[in-house]
Image (cartoon, rainbow, N blue to C red):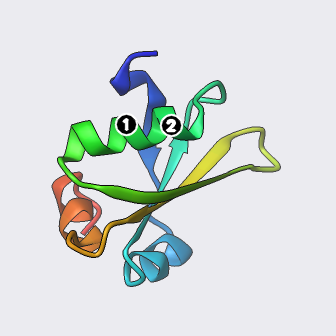
């Protein structure tokens, strides 16, 4: 799976904003993407180190990923790269 196909778009809601303070990013991802696919895509596209990936399916049939970054990186800085902040 191509890196650009794994990540659909970042989430920008109130919960996602709160999670960024805990150094986590939230994305809607491809349904077929595995946790390792998501980790690889984030690390290569944003040049960061990912420490954990959690996924869940939404009621709308989408797949949501919660990505925890390594302490050496800031989720706020990464979010500013894709225009959330």
Q: Which residue corresponds to the image point at 66% horizontal and 42% vertical from the top-left?
A: 63
Q: Closest to the observer: 60 or 72?
A: 72
Which type of secondary structure does the marked residue at label 2 adopt?
helix
On the image, the x and y values in percent for residue 1 come to 46, 15
Residue under numbered circle 1: 40
On the image, the x and y values in percent for residue 73 come to 21, 69
Q: Closest to the observer: 59 or 34?
A: 34
Q: Which residue corresponds to the image point at 47% horizontal and 82% vertical from the top-left?
A: 18
Query: Toward which corner of the image does residue 75 lie, by quadrant?
Result: bottom left
> Position of 17 compared to 55: left or right?
left
On the image, the x and y values in percent for residue 74 come to 23, 72
Q: Which residue corresponds to the image point at 37% horizontal and 36% vertical from the top-left?
A: 40
Mark number for residue 36?
2
Question: Residue lying furthest right in this view?
Answer: 59
Check contact, mark 2 vs mark 1: CB within 8 A: yes
In the depicted structure, whether residue 39 falls above or below residue 11: above
In the depicted structure, whether residue 42 falls above or below residue 4: below
On the image, the x and y values in percent for residue 49 come to 28, 55
């Amino acid at each position: 799976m191509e890196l650009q196909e794994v990540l659909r778009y970042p989430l920008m809601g109130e919960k996602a904003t709160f999670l960024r303070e805990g150094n986590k990013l939230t994305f809607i991802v491809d349904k077929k993407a595995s946790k390792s696919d998501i980790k690889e895509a984030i690390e290569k596209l944003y040049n960061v180190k990912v420490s954990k990936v959690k996924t869940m399916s939404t009621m709308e049939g989408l797949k949501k990923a919660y990505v925890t970054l390594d302490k050496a990186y800031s989720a706020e800085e990464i979010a500013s790269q894709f225009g959330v902040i």
